[in-house]
Image (cartoon, grey):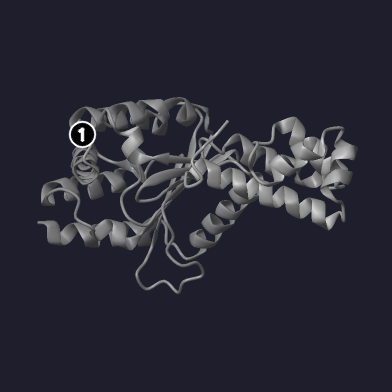
Amino acid sequence: MSASPSSSAQAAREAIATRLGGLRREAELTGHELALRCGWSPAKSSRIERAKTPASDADIRAWCKACGADGQVEDLIAANRQADQMYVHWQKLHRHGMRRAQEEVVPLYEQTRHFRVYCSNVVPGMLQTEAYAAALLSTIAAFQGTPDDSETAAASRIERSRVLHEGDHRFALLLEETVLRYRIGDEATMAGQLGYLLAVMALPNVSLGVIPFTARRRVWPLEAFYLFDSRQASVELLTAAVNVTAPSEIATYAKAFSELSKIAVHGAAARALISEAITPLG
């Protein structure tokens, strides 16, 4: 199972190999001693530790047991399983347009009961109007040089957002105040989007907070991230989506969300900030 040394998947495998090597050294074992405990050849231990051979789940369990580090098994296996899916490059995902990308996450949305979302740049997809989504997706397609199917992709995004109104789903969403001011589309598009945020706030299963410009920061502005229950965090970067499933990393994003929640305003104060952003749009 080969990969370019510069690829993200290989980088993830190298990180796993480094952690395994660290466990071996902490246990004060040589590669030969570890191999004896695991019941395999010293060459296999060396290949795994140098990231020349990807470790299987069974290999990780055996390695951790040999090192007396059973508590590391869950995180390492989770990281190992996501090595190929950790970085999903947008240009690859959108090479045939963006509609399919909207549809592929529908099962994840339907299965999630508790959504926690933080956005510092744009309105979260599940809260976007069709006009706002189309304007945003069109600019993304132009920047990436991928097919522009923004109209149909926006319609699929709206269809995906039915989870707001169907099923047993709860939503906690945090926006930086900048999101209310960034102009995506024309004035009418932005006014419609901000008006929709005011309407969504009335839903009993939605908590929408806004972090004001004037908030004293407990956590610096971060990249946008989505928490799907406690099983996955999806982080949006310029070139790729990063899908995190290691429990300790998910816990870190959950901690960040909790800390960001403490500096956000909700209810009437949040509605006032949204209404203020609508005013100059005419």
Between 132 and 269, the residue placed more toward the observer is 132
Q: Is residue 187 above or below residue 178?
A: above
Along the horizontal axis of the image, is 158 left or right of 151? right
Q: Quadrant of the C terminus?
A: bottom left
Residue at left 59%, top 41%?
A: 245
Of helix, strand and loop, which one carries label 1?
A: helix
Residue marked by disc 1:
150
Q: Is residue 274 above or below residue 152?
A: below
Between 262 and 53, the residue placed more toward the observer is 53
> Where's residue 224, x and y in %?
41, 52
Residue at left 77%, top 41%?
A: 45
Question: Which quadrant holds residue 34?
Answer: top right
Along the horizontal axis of the image, is 6 left or right of 21? left
Q: Amino acid at mark 1?
A: Ser
> Where's residue 109, x and y in %?
46, 31
Question: Which quadrant holds residue 178?
Answer: bottom left
Residue at left 18%, top 43%?
A: 142
**What residue occupies the far front of the structure in this picture?**
43
Q: How many marks?
A: 1
> Where's residue 275, x and y in %?
24, 58
Between 121 and 243, the residue placed more toward the observer is 243
> Where's residue 163, x and y in %?
41, 30
Q: Is residue 99 above or below residue 12?
A: above
Residue at left 63%, top 40%?
A: 52
Q: Rate crowding at label 1 as few (under 14), some (14 to 19) or many (20 or more) other CA atoms within 10 Å.
A: many
Along the horizontal axis of the image, is 116 left or right of 152? right
